[in-house]
Amino acid sequence: MADADDSEHEDFHDHWVHSHRDVQGGNARAAVFGVSDGLVSNVALILGIAGASTDGSLVRLAGVSGLLAGAISMAAGEWVSVRAQNELIERELEIERQSLRDNPEAEAKELAAIYRERGLDPEHADQVVAGIMSNPEIALDVHAREELGIDPHGVGSPLQVAASSFFAFAIGAVVPLIPWFITDGINATIASVILGVTGAAVVGFLVAHFTERSAVRTALRQVMVAGLACTATYLIGSALGVSIT
């Protein structure tokens, strides 16, 4: 009988229980957007230079410089941002930890008031808070989430985020540059355009996967953004022009 009950429970669990994705973090999503940034910015730069001069050495120099400058800038920006965010979170947690030690009654009342505002009756709210406050670590975790809106365990590694941003940007930026290591002139320009459009479409499909939006519509949007950037920089480069001697 017990086995039958367990089987029914498992069937119910499998049928009704569903999981949620992590919509706040996600290294994969960050990598996709980093690749997108590298692709669009460098294909626009390469075609801007190609519009001014199809000299292969000049375009390669600009493309590699754009790749390195963009990747380093992205990595440095992410490192500073995550480091500052972590320091702010640590400071706020220390303040909250001190307050829980010095004024536990006031903190308990504050948390109970939050739960009452969310619909719990006063007695039930007080019971929940009493259980939470009995464990200092749980109390800190709950107060951080409810009062400050932060996840004490959600801090990221600045170095890891910086490295991820660097390589994601570099991967996207190198795609339109590949033809210029093989050939130059109009052939390399056309190949860069094809790779840029294809890469933008792939990024669009990946973005659609994460956001659960229309894959075709998102891919077309990415292609349109890349196309507009490339067209603008190519026309500007053509209008300015350079002379290589």
Image (spheres, rainbow, N blue to C red):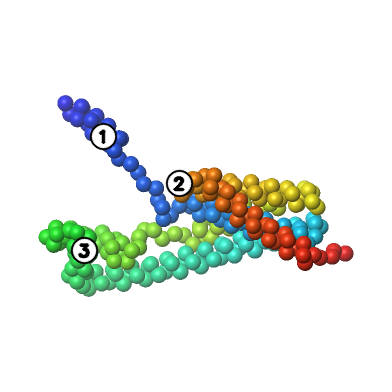
- Tell me the residue that label 3 is attached to: 117
At horizontal 23% and vertical 33% (from top left) the residue drawn is 9
- Looking at the image, is 190 positioned above or below residue 63? above
Disc 1 residue type (three-letter): Phe
Asked whether 115 or 231 is in front, the reply is 231
CB-based contact (under 8 Å), mark 1 and mark 2: no
Provide the secondary structure element on which disc 1 rests. helix
Amino acid type, mark 3: Glu
Tell me if residue 242 can be seen.
Answer: yes
Is 2 in front, or is 66?
Answer: 66
The answer for how far apart the CA atoms under marks 1 and 2 are is 27 Å
Q: Earlier in the sequence, mark 3 or mark 2?
A: 3
Q: Which type of secondary structure does the marked residue at label 2 adopt?
A: loop
Write down the residue under mark 2.
212
Q: Could you say where residue 144 lies in the image, as x and y percent from the top left? A: 30, 64
Q: Nearer the viewer, residue 164 or 112?
A: 112
Q: Secondary structure at mark 3?
A: helix
